[in-house]
Structure formats: C-alpha cells, structure tokens
Amino acid sequence: MPSSRSRSRAAALVLLAVLAGASGCGEAQEQQRPAKPFNDADVEFVATAGPHLTVTVTTARTAEDRARDADVRQLAEEVAVSQGKHADAVSAWVSEWGEQGAPFSHGDEDRFAHEVSAGFTVETVATLSSSSKARFDRFYLRSLLEHLEAGRTIWRSEAANGRDEEARDLAEQILAEQEDLSRAAAGLLRR
C-alpha cells in the first residue's frame, strides 16, 4: 500500500496535469518550441572547431603546392579533403544554430585563437609560406602534428559533453581521422 506521502505526490502531479491542460481550454494553445538540439559544449565545439579546421585545410592546401616529397603532398591532400568536409559541416551548424539562439559572436574565435592555432600560428604560416622546399616538408609535418594534437582536446570535450548527436559523432570521427593523419605524418618524419 502506498504511503500517504506517495499518494500526496501523485495527487499533486494529477492536479498539475489537470491545471496545465485546463489553462488552454477555449484558447489556442501556444505551441511549445522544441528544445534546442545543442548545449554550451556543442556551441563551444562549433566555435573552436571551425577556426581549427579552417587553419588545417588552409595549411594543407599550401603544402599541396609547396611540398617537395610526393608523400607529403599526398598527405596534405588527404588532410585538406577530409578536414574540409568537416569544416563545411561545422559552418552549416553555425548558421543553423545561430538562428536558434546559439550565442555565437566574433569574440569566440578570438577567445579560442591560441588553442585552435597551436601548431599553425600566424608566424608558422608565414614561415611555411616563405620556407624553401627543402625545409618545408619537415616543418609542415611537425607543425601539423602539433596542430592535430591540440585539436584532440576539442574533439574529446565534445564527444564527452555535447548534447547534439551529430556534433558528437562528428567529433569522434574527426578524432579518429586525425589520429590516423598524425600517425602518417609521424611516419613521414621518421624517414
């Protein structure tokens, strides 16, 4: 037999349900907006992933043109294609979620500039652009490894804390791909 406390809770719940239903009688019920598909972790992920992936793709395109070793050029092409797809997905979320009230601002990119550019700072990109082909390959590979390592924090945080299933899945996919790219870059450096 339920306790008097359990019965009181049940009665209160029934009363709340009746009152909630009755409040709209004779009036058009206001449609409830669906819950936002994202949380703060998702917003932070998108705000940091976009710049991180953009820098990754931009430097990979430079490496496709400047690398001396065919294997480095091939790796750069793989980086540009795979990470470019992800940058496009993240860019779409910025638009979609921004319309749904995600607190994106231009300050987000500045706030995360250090974390997302690790390995590919402004100075590194300038050095890559001006380095000789003989120096370029090793410098690009070392910088790529550092940059991919910095990204792991972004991907792991989203996978663990994000609400949006697609964003979590993308973070896990990027993490796996970037681990493969890191192994490939490390292998090229060991030659």
Image (cartoon, rainbow, N blue to C red):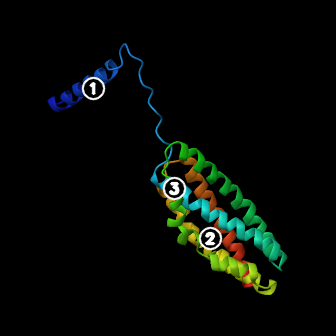
Q: Give the mark, 2 or 3, whose residue is nearer the N terminus.
A: 3
Q: Which quadrant of the rendered structure holds the C terminus? A: bottom right
Q: Nearer the viewer, mark 2 or mark 3?
A: 3
| Residue closest to the eye, 166 or 2 | 166
- Amino acid found under the numbered disc labelled 1: Leu
Q: Give the mark, 3 or 1, whose residue is nearer the N terminus.
A: 1
Residue 143, image x, y percentages: 66, 78
Badge 3 is on which residue? 105
- Amino acid found under the numbered disc labelled 2: Leu
Badge 2 is on which residue? 148
How far is disc 2 from disc 3 in space, using C-alphas? 25 Å
Q: Residue furthest front?
A: 106
Q: Residue furthest top?
A: 26
Residue 114, image x, y percentages: 54, 72
Q: Residues within 10 Å of mark 2 (few under 14, many from 20)?
A: many
Q: Identify the secondary structure beneath mark 1.
A: helix
Relative to 5, is 93 above or below? Answer: below
Badge 1 is on which residue? 16
Picture quarter containing residue 60? bottom right
Picture quarter containing residue 18? top left
Q: Residues within 10 Å of mark 1 (few under 14, many from 20)?
A: few
| Residue closest to the eye, 168 or 29 | 29
Q: Residue at x 61, y 65 (%)?
A: 52
Q: Residue furthest left?
A: 4
Residue 166, image x, y percentages: 58, 48
Q: Nearer the viewer, mark 3 or mark 1?
A: 3
Q: Identify the secondary structure beneath mark 2.
A: helix
Left or right of 134 in this view: 1: left
How far is disc 2 from disc 1 in space, using C-alphas? 52 Å
